[in-house]
Image (cartoon, coloured by chain):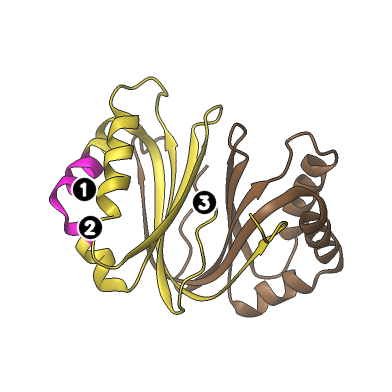
Chain colours: A yellow, B brown
Amino acid sequence: MPAPLFEVPYYAVIFCAKRTDEDEPGYAEMAGEMARLAATMPGYLGVESTRDPQTGLGITVSYWKDEASILGWKKQADHAGARKLGREKWYASYALRVAKIERDYDFRADPRD
Amino acid sequence: MPAPLFEVPYYAVIFCAKRTDEDEPGYAEMAGEMARLAATMPGYLGVESTRDPQTGLGITVSYWKDEASILGWKKQADHAGARKLGREKWYASYALRVAKIERDYDFRADPRD
């Protein structure tokens, strides 16, 4: 689902990655574990994530209260280990960008949803 | 593919949308046409886009030189028409955020790729 709007300004980490091999073991478990762990970190606001299984291209945008929360998440030990595994095994390439959200809006076809 | 890095600061439009119905006609054609049109706009830098066909959740992040280029794209007539169709037919919900990229980095498993 699209993440809700938050109070501006806030921060986003835009992570776009191309996978090496869909069958590389351990990826789904690690991704799920990292999503759960991120949600426990101070300053975490929410996440949007999707991947096309056919092309192996995924985009995950995580939202954070401020730059200090992003730094805290970067330094978190398990996450640092997962990032190392990502470079060694799972990702053919990725780009990561840190951005300050300055405005946002949303839309819902059926407001009762 | 992940988009290349650009000279900071630059801007991103983060668009996360949940589709109504995968079989709604005209969507793929319009999406392709909008991607081609965006690439002709002044200040356009690049795009990252992916969607999971099973969940209907897609994320498109387009990159722009400055806020003026984003405003130019928003005002482009065909794009405004496509956005209206999107709200009427294709999207159950979406969130759109405008962000200033402050730092970025990338990774490539095989630098010869």
Is there a contact, CB below 8 Å, between mark 1 and mark 2? yes
**Looking at the image, residue B8 lies above or below residue A44:** below
- Most foreground residue, B17 or B8: B17
Q: Quadrant of residue B19?
A: top right
Q: Which residues are magenta?
A: A73-84
Residue A86 appears in the figure: yes
Q: Chain of mark 2?
A: A
- CA neighbours of label 3 inside 10 A, class few (<14), some (14 to 19), many (20+): some
| Residue picked out by circle 2 | A74
- Most foreground residue, A45 or A19: A45
Which mark is on residue B88? none
Marks 3 and 1: which is nearer the front? 1
User: Of helix, strand and loop, which one carries label 3?
Assistant: loop
- CA neighbours of label 1 inside 10 A, class few (<14), some (14 to 19), many (20+): some
| A58 horizontally vs A109: left or right | left
Alpha-carbon distance for marks 3 and 1?
24 Å
| Residue picked out by circle 3 | B3
| Residue picked out by circle 1 | A79
3 and 1 marks on the same chain: no
- Most foreground residue, A91 or A61: A61
1 and 2 marks on the same chain: yes
Amino acid identity at mark 2? Lys
